């Protein structure tokens, strides 16, 4: 690809806060060409002002729509308007459930190909995906229209920016069709002091081996400032909220460190975490499948291992 290529990245920040995942999109985008952030938020100027720490060349602030009142469709239409204006080589979006829906709508509106859940993308917009429960790595490229790619968080180290990006305003006309659904109320998720699961650099998860007692898992996670996850067995049993489930039918995480506590390592769980940079497994069963995937393994009872590890980590602070 030429250095003159343009890459659009979506800044979806209805709460007015820019996620570090945007910095990852910008870092990937820099490999391809000029990075242009498309800001779809009611406080577009305020959101754009937060982008200076990321490797973004320009920012387009979309106006003319109440993005907070009509869910995802207006954001997809605003992004489509930016695509029509810029004719980009690629559009990069964070691979959340929301991001993938926006990407799918954009692909339909622009008659373009779509690749989801990529863990890497190179200078030629060739994406790397981990598929079939992580058993196969696929390199894919879009061959029609604009390359629309959703990328998992924690897939690349964020490249720092050189200062505030230049900004411009793009007035968009949102169709009546995009306004057919309305947001009647918003309720923020109650958060503790732990980081968001899909964005955390360290994740500690508990499974059937906890017997429903996540206290040592949470204490160990807190000692490292980590997020807490859970296996499907644990969430199905009602031991931990389904919003924390890691796996093929839950959330996909790619942290720098993943600690699996009392998790056997069935393919359903492995599909959601095996792209982690380092995996540590703690399990009483030396034959547990998780040890085949782990970089380091501890054969032992998590109720004995985790408190000792927590004490040791806290002592070093």
Image (tube, helix red, strand yellow):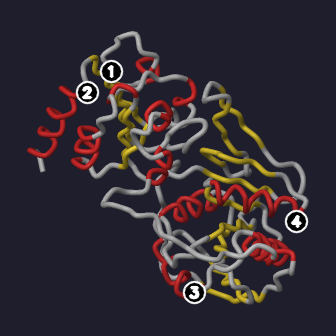
Return the residue nearer the eye: 84 or 254.
Answer: 254
Task: Name the residue located 44 percent from the left edge and 44 percent from the top edge.
Answer: 255
Q: Classify mark 2: helix, strand or loop.
A: helix
Q: Nearer the viewer, mark 2 or mark 4?
A: 2
Q: Residue beneath label 1, please? A: 283
Dot 2 and dot 1 residues touching (CB under 8 Å)? yes
Residue 167: x %, y % from top left: 63, 86
Between discs 2 and 3, the one toward the N terminus: 3
Q: Classify mark 1: helix, strand or loop.
A: strand
Instruction: Give the quadrant of the N terminus.
Output: bottom right
Dot 1 and dot 4 residues touching (CB under 8 Å)? no
Return the residue nearer the eye: 138 or 166.
Answer: 138
Q: Nearer the viewer, mark 1 or mark 4?
A: 1
Circle 4 residues within 10 Å: few <14, some 14–19, many ≥20: some
Q: Residue beneath label 3, please? A: 43
Q: Nearer the viewer, mark 2 or mark 3?
A: 2
Q: Residue beneath label 2, please? A: 302
Q: CA distance from mark 2 to mark 1?
A: 7 Å
Task: Name the residue located 66 percent from the left edge and 84 percent from the top edge.
Answer: 61
Dot 2 and dot 4 residues touching (CB under 8 Å)? no
Between discs 2 and 1, the one toward the N terminus: 1
Q: Residue beneath label 4, please? A: 109
Q: CA distance from mark 1 to mark 4?
A: 48 Å
């Amino acid at each position: 690809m030429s250095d003159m290529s343009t890459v659009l990245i979506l800044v979806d920040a209805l709460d007015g806060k820019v996620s570090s995942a945007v910095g990852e999109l910008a870092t990937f985008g820099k490999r391809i060409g000029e990075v242009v952030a498309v800001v779809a938020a009611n406080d577009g100027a305020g959101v754009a002002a937060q982008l200076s720490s990321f490797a973004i060349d320009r920012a387009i602030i979309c106006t003319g729509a109440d993005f907070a009142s009509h869910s995802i469709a207006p954001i997809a239409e605003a992004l489509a308007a930016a695509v029509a204006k810029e004719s980009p080589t690629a559009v990069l979006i964070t691979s959340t459930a929301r991001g993938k829906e926006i990407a799918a709508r954009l692909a339909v509106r622009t008659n373009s190909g779509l690749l989801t859940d990529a863990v890497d993308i190179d200078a030629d917009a060739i994406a790397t995906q981990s598929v079939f429960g992580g058993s196969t790595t696929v390199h894919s490229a879009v061959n029609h229209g604009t390359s629309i790619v959703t990328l998992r968080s924690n897939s690349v180290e964020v490249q720092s920016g050189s200062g505030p990006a230049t900004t411009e305003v793009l007035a968009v006309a949102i169709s009546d069709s995009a306004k057919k659904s309305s947001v009647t109320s918003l309720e923020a998720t109650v958060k503790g002091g732990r980081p968001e699961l899909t964005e955390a650099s360290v994740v500690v998860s508990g499974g059937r081996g906890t017997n429903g007692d996540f206290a040592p898992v949470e204490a160990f996670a807190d000692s490292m400032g980590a997020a807490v996850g859970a296996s499907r067995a644990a969430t199905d049993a009602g031991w931990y909220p389904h919003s924390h489930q890691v796996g093929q039918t839950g959330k996909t995480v790619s942290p720098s460190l993943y600690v699996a506590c009392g998790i056997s390592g069935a393919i359903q769980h492995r599909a959601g975490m095996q792209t982690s940079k380092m995996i540590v497994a703690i399990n009483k069963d030396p034959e547990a499948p998780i040890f085949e995937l782990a970089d380091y393994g501890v054969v032992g009872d998590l109720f004995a291992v985790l408190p000792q590890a927590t004490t040791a980590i806290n002592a070093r602070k």
